[in-house]
Amino acid sequence: MPADKRLWMTFPIDFPEHPKIRPLSDAAFRAFVEINGYSRTQDLDGRVPVRVARAKWKPKALRELEENHPDRPTLSIDGDDYVIHNYAEHQQTKAAREAQSQTNSANGRLGGRPRKNRTETDSVSDSEATAKQSQSQSQSQSDDVTHFPESSHQGDGPGQGLDLGEVLAHKAKGAGIKNLPKVLAQIRSVVGAVSPAGAIELVEEITGRAKGTIRNVDAYVATACRNSPDEVQSDYDRLDIAAIA
């Protein structure tokens, strides 16, 4: 399991060559990946409301995913939801995460993950065992954690070597945002899953239309999300912001 505790999706390394995936257009391929990400971040276990899907992804791309196999298409409609075929075989479900969380909690109460029975010939000292217990406790966390990776670093580019948390803070300050987590939550309440950087870009688009001076960007964005959600969604769609960081 990666040390990075952000949410992850899993796909076989050769899945682009799968007979159902290979013929897809670029738009349909991207929609497939983003639909998986949206369902994962929203804890929907492979389901996405039809109204949300049709607002976020192009109808032609959705049709490709519905028609890429006569019996087992990538997407199918069940009531008011799209259902991703075999989602639970590839992505972690809510039930699995909750079970893992309970196991981690139980292990934590017992001093970490259960260790194998030791024989009398084991040479591990009591101090070494205590240190290992402490390390196991500190690492025993639920996989269901979403956060801004404060210790992560940028790759190539102008921000190389800078702490990602500092980069986001700098971008947020430049956009006039005072409380990025709060603004991010407001944006996500309208458009669904969006990265912090994408939310900042969207805020800049929203505030850029203002006719006068904005004294409080956070409050302005909150009002826009509350009173003009369709306009905010339209900005999001037009900017083509990636849904997942």
Image (cartoon, rainbow, N blue to C red):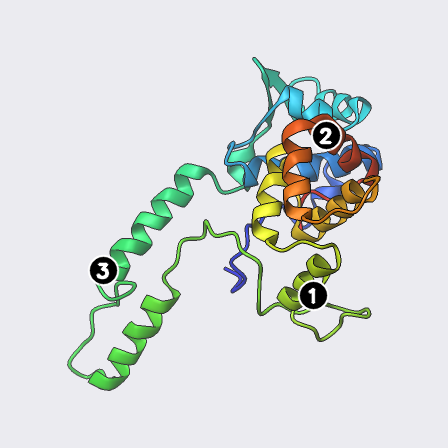
Upstream in the sequence, badge 2 or badge 1?
2
Q: Which is more N-terminal, label 2 or label 3?
A: 2
Residue named by callout 1: 167
Label 3 crowd (10 A; few <14 / some 14-19 / many >=20): few
Residue at screen point 70% across, 53% down: 197
Q: Are marks 3 and 2 in contact (CB under 8 Å)?
A: no
Q: Is residue 37 visible?
A: no
Distance CA(mark 2)–CA(mark 1)? 28 Å
Residue 224 lies left or right of residue 127; in this view the side is: right
Residue 111 higher or lower than 51, as above or below: below
**Other-residue count near label 2 (Cα within 10 Å), few / some / many at <14 / 14–19 / ≥20:** many
- Give the residue at mark 2: 56
Q: Amino acid at mark 1?
A: Val
Q: Could you say where residue 207 lies in the image, as x and y percent from the top left?
A: 77, 44
Amino acid on which disc 2 is placed: Lys
The residue identified by callout 3 is 109
Residue in the picture at 26% in, 67% down: 115
Vertical arrangement, residue 97 with respect to residue 31, above or below: below
Question: Where does residue 127 sit, x and y in percent of width and height?
Answer: 24, 85
Q: Nearer the viewer, mark 2 or mark 1?
A: 1
Q: CA separation, marks 3 and 2?
A: 43 Å
Left/right placement of residue 44 relative to residue 73 reads: left
Residue 143: tell me if it is visible. Answer: yes
